[in-house]
Amino acid sequence: MEITINGAKTNYQAFGDGKPFLILHGWGSASDRWIKEAEIISAKGFKVIVPDLPGFGESDKLEKPWRDNDYVKWFEEFTKELCVENFYLLGYSFGGALAAKIAVKYPQRVQRLFLVASAVIRKKTAPKDFSARVAKVIKVLHFLPYYAFFRKAVYKFIIRKSDYVYTEGVMKETYLNVISDDISYKLSFIRVPTIIIWGDKDQSVPIEDAHIINEKVKNSKLVIIPGADHLMHKQLPEILAEKILENI
């Protein structure tokens, strides 16, 4: 399915009927990564709606770089177009940062917030500083033969965790905008009931972040899935859906 928001197409998938349950996917992902969870949750009396965030999946590409707040504004229009007033909201990784901002801005609309391996805390660390320095050096060496191959190799084997090398066009600057926005200071303003779900083997967004979020969000509960890593939504969809339904 698709709708047009401010002249741009937003693709989305919808499952079932009942209380609206929206899922915001992670960076570089799309709605089709959440089909299994959507099917399980919708079977329990929910209408699960999973959009392709602008710039991802089958939604239109961005015409200019966005920030988190641009995605929040898009979400406002998206729910307005679908006539969705109150809803359950799940945000995964990058989508979790957006979901947290939405919950702060619209506490009366979010019935329950699920933060799944959410990239909410983006503090500067020694490894990140090192990665930034390496990225600058690589950029200077753009004149070298086989530069593109060399660049991808460095990101894959040295920097490793960065999605920057896999982005194109305006999404590169969008990515830099997104990772520079640390919204951890806003967590204490979340007033809606919040369920934090994490895998204890997550190497992309460490479980320490989950404990910090749990501490800062007063009305929150931390659910840890043993053995799960950052891709739990792909590897353990049934277990993740079960944890969501147990805490809805």
Image (cartoon, grey):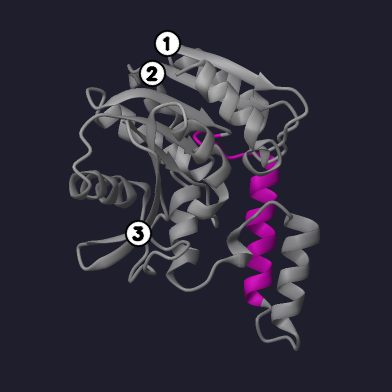
How far apart are labels 1 and 2 at the CA level? 7 Å
Residue type indicated by callout 1: Lys
How far apart are labels 3 and 1 at the CA level? 37 Å
Pointers 1 and 2 in contact (C-beta within 8 Å): yes
Residue type indicated by callout 3: Met
At x 39%, y 64%, the residue is: 59
Q: Is residue 166 above or below residue 85?
A: below
Tell me residue 33's x, y (percent): 57, 50
Q: Secondary structure at mark 2?
A: helix
Ranked by sequence position, the earlier of labels 1 and 2 is 2
Is residue 122 among the parts visible in the rendering? no
At x 50%, y 16%, the residue is: 247
At x 30%, y 52%, the residue is: 70
Mark identifier at residue 1: 3
Circle nearer the viewer, 1 or 2: 1
Pointers 3 and 1 in contact (C-beta within 8 Å): no
Query: What range of the chain is rendered magenta?
Result: 118-140
Tell me residue 183's x, y (percent): 42, 34
Tell me residue 220's x, y (percent): 46, 14
Is the C terminus in the top left, top right, bottom left or bottom right quadrant? top left
238 sits to left or right of 110: right
Circle nearer the viewer, 2 or 3: 3
Q: Is residue 10 above or below residue 197?
A: below
Ranked by sequence position, the earlier of labels 3 and 1 is 3
Mark 2 lies on residue: 188
Q: Secondary structure at mark 3?
A: loop
Residue type indicated by callout 2: Ser
